[in-house]
Image (cartoon, helix red, strand yellow):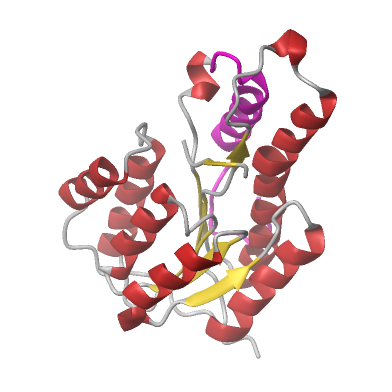
Amino acid sequence: NGADPIGAEEKPQALPPRKGRAHLTRLLDVLARIRSISTLPFAQMLQHEVPHLSWGTTVILITGASGGIGSAIARAFAGEGAKLVLHYHRNLAGARKLQHELAAVDPLLVRADLTKESQVINLFGQASRRFGRVDTLVANAGSWEIRDVPLYKMPLKQWRGTQDGVLTSTFLCVREFFRLVAKQKRGNAVLIGSTAAVFGEANHADYAAAKAAIASASSRCTSKRSSTPRS
């Protein structure tokens, strides 16, 4: 569950060695199985199951990095020496605090409303200009209505707002990332899911539907070293 309540291009480096790819595969598997919104269990699970990762010059873009799960992911990657792009929307104070905390890896901080196509393009543009590429996207950002609203009382405005905040934002980020992957010939996308996609969420049908759509799309997405990403 990755939601927070609403309120000159360098030549791509060679592919990592087989051992590095195995570590990455393992990490993606761990991330895919995260089920708790608590940051401490997330960090402990990551460190326990994926020890001794060596990310070197890997560039990782994390959306929603100022939130609980996003900041835990950022800290875990920073601990491995990865280069980070930290996205935030409204929580500037939280984002700057995290940027200061991770100063050793000099992360790039970028604000963007991920429901706006132009701002998503700018986010990836800034990342590319700073680092020359983006190796991994962690699509963690999301939003939901903190009030419990039964489906029969749910206004269309809320439904559409949640679909944009959770589903459309993920689509725009993944699409823009895949455009980079087509040039780089490599890349990995991690989409943070939710148990709501599997079991539903009482009085939050809008959020459950959006997360279920992401889960369905990601399960059919093929990741391969190809000039044209497929889905």
The residue nearer to you, when weighing 94 against 28, is 94
Q: Residue furthest right?
A: 156
Q: Residue at x 40, y 82 (%)?
A: 106
Q: Decide if residue 189 is on the left or right side of residue 20.
A: right
- In x, y percent, where is residue 13? 46, 80
| Quadrant for the C terminus in the image | top right
- In x, y percent, where is residue 3? 53, 40
- In the rendered view, tell whether residue 184 sits above or below residue 160: below
Q: Residue at x 40, y 48 (%)?
A: 69
- In x, y percent, where is residue 203? 60, 15
Q: Is residue 13 magenta?
A: no
Q: Decide if residue 152 is on the left or right side of residue 226.
A: right
* Number of marks present in the image shown: 0
Q: Quadrant of residue 210?
A: top right
Q: Decide if residue 92 is on the left or right side of residue 33.
A: right
The residue nearer to you, when weighing 59 against 148, is 148
Start-end of magenta stretch? 201-229
Q: Is residue 215 magenta?
A: yes
Is residue 217 visible to us here? yes
Q: Residue at x 32, y 50 (%)?
A: 27
Is residue 11 visible to us here? no
Q: Residue furthest top?
A: 152
Q: Residue furthest bottom?
A: 8
The residue nearer to you, when weighing 186 against 117, is 117
- In the rendered view, tell whether residue 80 sits above or below residue 148: below
Q: Residue at x 66, y 18 (%)?
A: 149
- In x, y percent, where is residue 145? 63, 32
